[in-house]
Amino acid sequence: MKKPRIKIIIAPYLRKAYINASKILENNIYECLFLNFPKIMEKLFLLLLNERINYEDFILKIKDLNLPHISSESWLYIYEPLIKKIYSLKLRKFKIFCYINDEDYFKSIDYSINSIALLLRTGLMNKIDKEKWLKHLFEEIDFDIKLNKKILNTIENEAIKFDSSICISDFNGCFLEEKLNEKFEVELIYSIIPYIFTPLAILKRKLILKEKLNNNEIEKLIFQQIDYIKNYVLLSDNLDEAYYKWVSRKILEYIDCKCFLI
């Protein structure tokens, strides 16, 4: 019996990644599109796809939901290409499924806020509270692992109903690809190659892989993240500009950090 097909598009949090992901959506045929958004947004995407609302109305209704972070200028900057592409594909017949539980979405925002608070405190004090940092990071990693299992279960149960699906994910899509292979014909697509992880993401990956890290390595990565935010994100017009300025100026400095995804 032929396995259902699913393409997993890994898209980092950059506008360029979602521009490229949108092109993949346009050039492929699929019956279901899985989106890495909270479940509460699913009805609005379906209204958009079925021409019940236009793009401008969609944005207004998203803002009415009062979801933290979502509908902010930075959020719209990243996801606008994807939303507009879905609207342009309204003549196609496919389902849309937002696969992040609303409660888990709010928890993920809390972890992001805690990271920002720790970075701000560390930058102001010019000193790292290692115990607080590791406690926060390990709690976030534990949350991510549990969330990935929930997402896997959701996608597995829904995608089996279709011959062909596309799933847009962050780098946790690698976990999905590994686990879905048994029941599905899976293709993993990176929307940006090569991609260089930011310092805090590198630290999290090292902790997940249980690499031995001394205090100096932990401090170095955290202060590099502060440098990235202070000297690139805050001084740029948008996240893509900040990221690519950082990459162009810091690439040689990070080559030995296993931060390339090829």
Image (cartoon, rainbow, N blue to C red):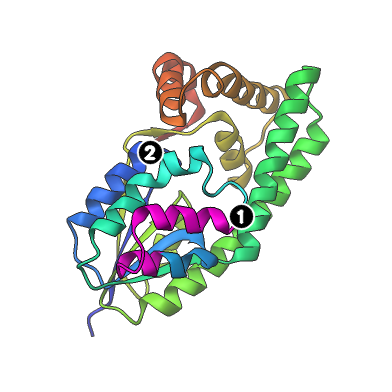
Q: Position of residue 65 (x, y in %)?
A: 58, 59
Q: Position of residue 62 (x, y in %)?
A: 50, 56
Q: Position of residue 246 (x, y in %)?
A: 46, 20
Residue segment shown in magenta: 45-65
Is residue 104 visible in the rendered image? The answer is yes
Residue at image location 52% in from the left, 67% down from the top: 39
- The magenta stretch spans residue 63: yes
220 over 109 or under it: above or below: above
Which residue is nearer to you in this view: 78 or 181? 78
Which residue is tagged 2?
15
Residue at image location 37% in from the left, 73% down from the top: 182
Q: Which mark is residue 66?
A: 1
The secondary element bearing badge 1 is classed as loop
Inspect the image, locate mark 2, and give the three-letter code of the amino acid beneath it: Arg
Q: Image quadrant for the C terminus?
A: top left
Q: Is residue 40 left or right of residue 35?
A: right
Task: Tally the numbered discs.
Answer: 2
Q: Dot 2 surroundings within 10 Å: few (below 14), some, or many (20 or more)? A: many
* Comes first in the chain, label 2 or label 1: 2
Q: Position of residue 226 (x, y in %)?
A: 64, 23
